[in-house]
Image (cartoon, helix red, strand yellow):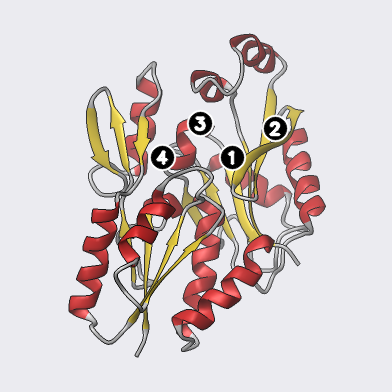
């Protein structure tokens, strides 16, 4: 008996992945046209539309029927296996509740709220895969993941305040002032919510601010999964950050050799393009 892993696309695991993970997509709507995140719209296509449209897209959660379909698909293919579902934060989406409803009919389907999103949730799922590959049961995995969950963090530096303004998260005046001052806000996940940690003027200061905030959280545990990510079309800003911060990152992480992912619609809608982010566990 093994454990099958199901996630929603708010964890930013690609629908085609080499980790044997089933991904159930969120939905994102631009101008009354709805797409399945990661299936009928790629991350590159998402950011091109995000820049083109004046209004923000609307994302919607995975519903219970979609989770039930994923569970039944796994059960048909692997009837003797247990299932563990990991979802993006319940503070940011109703997807976790949908998974609970779908799992209620099964004794061997377990659900955990990552209390994270995007790059942080992906690092958390990577750890779940590590536990699965060690041969643990779903219940054993669940207990360990709940214990480790408070140590998993996502932290990101935004390149613009424009999309926070569009989403009503900050005022137009603050966005204009921030643009003039070249302010780069740093955000993090905190108990499932997204909080502002501060802002710095210019990219160099913002990189330093990001590293200082990582240290405040407890520093990166090099023995646990780590993910680096970016939003938009280009990873150039992220590679500059990696080069500037090589002495603070775990050994082996260089601009040429590091786990780089793209940030999808769940966070990208409000972060906008050219954000850089890290998902990691603290020491």
In front: mark 3 or mark 2? 3
Label 3 secondary element? helix
* Residue 233 image-quadrant placement: top left
Q: Which mark is residue 237?
A: 1
Residue at the spot x=49%, y=86% of the render?
136
Residue at the spot x=35%, y=21% of the render?
52
User: Which residue is denoted by mark 3 in the rendering?
Assistant: 270
In front: mark 3 or mark 1? 3
The answer to whether marks 4 and 3 mark residues whose Cβ atoms lie closer than 8 Å is no
Image position, residue 29 (x, y; %): 29, 31
* Residue 178 image-quadrant placement: top right
Label 3 vs 2, first from the N-terminus: 2
Crowding near pointer 4: few (<14 within 10 Å), some, many (20+)? many
User: Which residue is denoted by mark 2 in the rendering?
Assistant: 203
Task: State how far apart marks 4 and 3 are (Cα).
Answer: 9 Å
In the rendered view, would you say 48 is above or below 207?
above
Task: State how far apart marks 3 and 2 are (Cα).
Answer: 19 Å
Task: State how far apart marks 3 and 1 are (Cα).
Answer: 18 Å
Task: State how far apart marks 4 and 2 are (Cα).
Answer: 24 Å
Label 4 vs 2, first from the N-terminus: 2
Label 1 secondary element? helix
Residue at the spot x=54%, y=41% of the render?
236
User: Which residue is denoted by mark 4 in the rendering?
Assistant: 265
Position of 111 with respect to 151 (left or right) is left
Position of 82 with respect to 281 (left or right) is left
Label 1 vs 4, first from the N-terminus: 1
In front: mark 1 or mark 4? 4
The answer to whether marks 1 and 2 mark residues whose Cβ atoms lie closer than 8 Å is yes
Label 4 vs 3, first from the N-terminus: 4
Position of 247 with respect to 188 (left or right) is right
In the rendered view, would you say 73 is above or below 163?
below
Label 2 secondary element? helix
């Amino acid at each position: 008996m093994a454990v099958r892993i199901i996630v929603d696309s708010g964890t930013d695991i690609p629908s085609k992945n080499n980790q044997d993970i089933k991904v159930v997509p969120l939905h994102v709507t631009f101008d009354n046209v709805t797409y399945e995140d990661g299936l009928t719209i790629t991350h590159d296509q998402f950011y091109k539309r995000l820049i083109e449209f004046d209004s923000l897209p609307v994302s919607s959660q995975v519903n219970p029927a979609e989770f039930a379909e994923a569970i039944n698909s796994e059960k048909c293919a692997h009837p003797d296996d247990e299932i563990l579902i990991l979802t993006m934060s319940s503070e940011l989406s109703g997807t976790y509740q949908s998974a609970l409803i779908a799992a209620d009919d099964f004794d061997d389907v377990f659900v955990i709220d990552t209390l994270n999103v995007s790059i942080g949730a992906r690092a958390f799922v990577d750890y779940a895969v590590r536990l699965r590959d060690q041969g643990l049961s779903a219940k054993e995995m669940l207990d360990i993941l709940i214990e480790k969950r408070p140590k998993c963090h996502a932290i990101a530096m935004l390149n613009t305040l424009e999309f926070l303004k569009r989403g009503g998260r900050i005022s137009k005046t603050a966005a204009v002032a921030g643009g003039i001052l070249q302010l780069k806000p740093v955000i993090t996940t905190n108990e499932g919510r997204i909080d502002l940690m501060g802002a710095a003027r210019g990219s160099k200061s913002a990189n330093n601010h990001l590293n200082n905030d990582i240290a405040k959280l407890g520093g990166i545990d090099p023995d646990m999964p780590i993910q680096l990510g970016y939003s938009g079309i280009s990873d150039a800003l992220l590679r500059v950050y990696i080069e500037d911060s090589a002495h603070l990152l775990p050994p082996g992480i260089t601009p040429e050799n590091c786990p780089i992912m793209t940030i999808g619609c769940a966070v990208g809608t409000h972060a906008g393009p050219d954000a850089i982010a890290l998902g990691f566990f603290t020491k």
